[in-house]
């Protein structure tokens, strides 16, 4: 799960990180009213689950009510396209109106799970701001890292080292930077984050240290123990098909291709996508219906796959272990009756009760069903069907 910037700011503020005051709004009029409540200049920021807003024109400094009105109208009326959104962009439904700050320098501070080292890593850089991805690519040495001990967490000397790596020499600023790093690590640990990032952390000409943008991702498997995060969940920002799948305990990820995949087991789903690509096709989704899939689960999976207009063919690849092949065959037949297959559905079944499953499918005589003898045969057939 991801959090909006305004939600991430709230968590940071609670952990003792200084964050400028702000308001969240969803209309132009409310944006103007929020401007009236803040002293001085403001920054209007689109609240969406994608970065690169600054460069896309969705972070705007405003020093009058008219400028706020224009910025709010633009952001709520246009889709934001950035390198992180894909060409279709995303709609903006909420805006943050935050007090603007004078920026002397911008820094980067983040905690992320380092899967290779199996520990969280704190990363800091003096070259924070909108170019951090470029810095990581071209000048990785400008990012200083310290790994957290899984039980001891952030040790004081590490924190001091990271703060001085940011280039602070003034005692007060060094302490302020350490407080920010500690606060960010606390949020990361307390809320089971996979990412907690402040970019930029800024120093003002008065020597104040402030977080003015934040991003957080949380481990979905830990959400059950965080009521606070459950309340933050914003379904309007999620892919509707992924949401529907989640409600039915299906693991579904939408992809860009045109071959829908219905598979049981994550490993089998991965190899199904691989073999489709090997034969020149492109999967439209990753869908794991689970090892113990039921008929209802499989029918719902079909509904989800077939509601995607991009899908021109489906590959059903089921290994009957806990799930029985004949159960899947029955679900296929029921789905064909209920939804009606307008596109070819290539079926490869193997495992428990596969003979019975084949008999059922044959007897049902569904014209769009294409039986496959093995996985290679299935991949070849489905790629040919959508070519
Ligand atoms: P994104 O990372 O999506 O581009 P940011 O919130 O980091 O969005 O904003 C981009 C840039 O806009 C910042 O690096 C900073 O230079 C400027 N900016 C953002 N918030 C403020 C603010 N409160 N006051 C002044 N400038 C800001
Ligand atoms: Mg940013």
Image (spheres, rainbow, N blue to C red):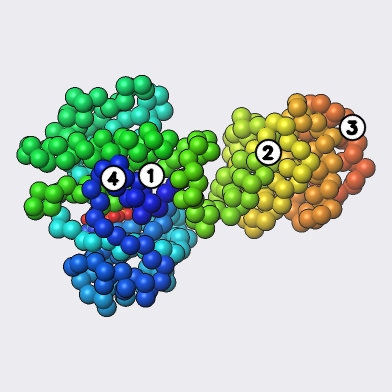
179 to the left or right of 52: left
| Whole-number angstrom distance, CA of label 1 to CA of label 3 | 49 Å
Give the foreground label among 1 and 3.
1
Q: Secondary structure at mark 2?
A: loop
Contact between labelled residues 1 and 2, with CB atoms less than 8 Å apart: no
| Whole-number angstrom distance, CA of label 3 to CA of label 4 | 58 Å
The residue at which mark 1 appears reads as 216
96 to the left or right of 127: right
Q: Is residue 196 visible?
A: yes
Q: How crowded is the residue under tag 2: few (<14 C-alpha within 10 Å), some, or many (20+)?
A: many
| Whole-number angstrom distance, CA of label 3 to CA of label 2 | 21 Å
| Whole-number angstrom distance, CA of label 2 to CA of label 1 | 28 Å
Give the foreground label among 4 and 2.
4
Q: Secondary structure at mark 1?
A: strand
User: Total marks drawn?
Assistant: 4
Residue 294 place in picture, x, y as percent: 76, 38
Give the foreground label among 3 and 4.
4
Badge 4 or badge 2: first in the primary sequence: 4
| Whole-number angstrom distance, CA of label 1 to CA of label 4 | 9 Å
Q: How crowded is the residue under tag 4: few (<14 C-alpha within 10 Å), some, or many (20+)?
A: many
The residue at which mark 3 appears reads as 356
102 to the left or right of 199: left
Badge 2 or badge 1: first in the primary sequence: 1
The residue at which mark 2 appears reads as 289
Ligand 1, by image quadrant, is: bottom left
Q: How crowded is the residue under tag 1: few (<14 C-alpha within 10 Å), some, or many (20+)?
A: many
Contact between labelled residues 2 and 4, with CB atoms less than 8 Å apart: no
The residue at which mark 4 appears reads as 198
């Amino acid at each position: 799960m991801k959090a909006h910037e305004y939600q991430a700011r709230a968590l940071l503020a609670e952990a003792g990180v200084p964050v400028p005051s702000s308001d969240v709004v969803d209309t132009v009029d409310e944006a103007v009213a929020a401007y009236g409540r803040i002293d001085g200049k403001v920054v209007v920021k689109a609240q969406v689950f994608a970065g690169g807003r600054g460069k896309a024109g969705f972070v705007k400094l405003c020093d009058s009510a008219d400028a706020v009105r224009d910025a709010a109208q633009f952001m709520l009326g246009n889709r934001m396209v950035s390198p992180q959104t894909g060409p279709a962009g995303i709609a903006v439904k909420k805006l943050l109106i935050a007090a603007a700050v004078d920026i002397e320098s911008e820094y980067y501070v983040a905690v992320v799970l380092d899967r290779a080292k199996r520990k969280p890593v704190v990363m800091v850089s003096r070259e924070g701001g909108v170019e951090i991805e470029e810095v990581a690519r071209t000048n990785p040495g400008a990012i200083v890292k310290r790994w957290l001990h899984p039980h001891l967490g952030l040790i004081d000397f590490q924190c001091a080292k990271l703060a001085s790596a940011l280039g602070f020499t003034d005692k007060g600023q060094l302490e302020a930077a350490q407080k920010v790093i500690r606060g960010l690590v606390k949020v990361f640990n307390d809320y089971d984050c996979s990412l907690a990032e402040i970019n930029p952390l800024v120093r003002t000409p008065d020597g104040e240290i402030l977080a003015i943008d934040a991003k957080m991702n949380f481990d979905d498997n830990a959400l059950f123990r965080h009521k606070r995060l459950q309340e933050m969940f914003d379904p309007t920002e999620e892919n509707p098909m992924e949401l529907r799948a989640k409600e039915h305990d299906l693991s579904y990820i939408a992809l860009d291709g045109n071959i829908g995949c219905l598979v049981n087991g994550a490993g089998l789903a991965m190899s199904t996508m691989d073999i489709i690509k090997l034969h020149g096709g492109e999967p439209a989704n990753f869908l794991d219906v689970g090892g113990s899939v039921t008929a209802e689960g499989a029918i719902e999976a079909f509904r989800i796959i077939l509601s995607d207009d991009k899908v021109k063919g489906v590959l059903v690849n089921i290994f009957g272990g806990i799930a029985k092949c004949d159960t899947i065959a029955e679900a296929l037949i029921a789905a064909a009756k209920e939804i009606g297959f307008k596109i070819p559905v290539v079926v490869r079944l193997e495992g428990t009760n596969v003979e019975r499953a084949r008999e059922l499918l044959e007897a049902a005589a569904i014209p769009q069903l294409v039986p496959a003898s093995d996985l290679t045969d299935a991949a070849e057939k489905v790629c040919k069907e959508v070519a």
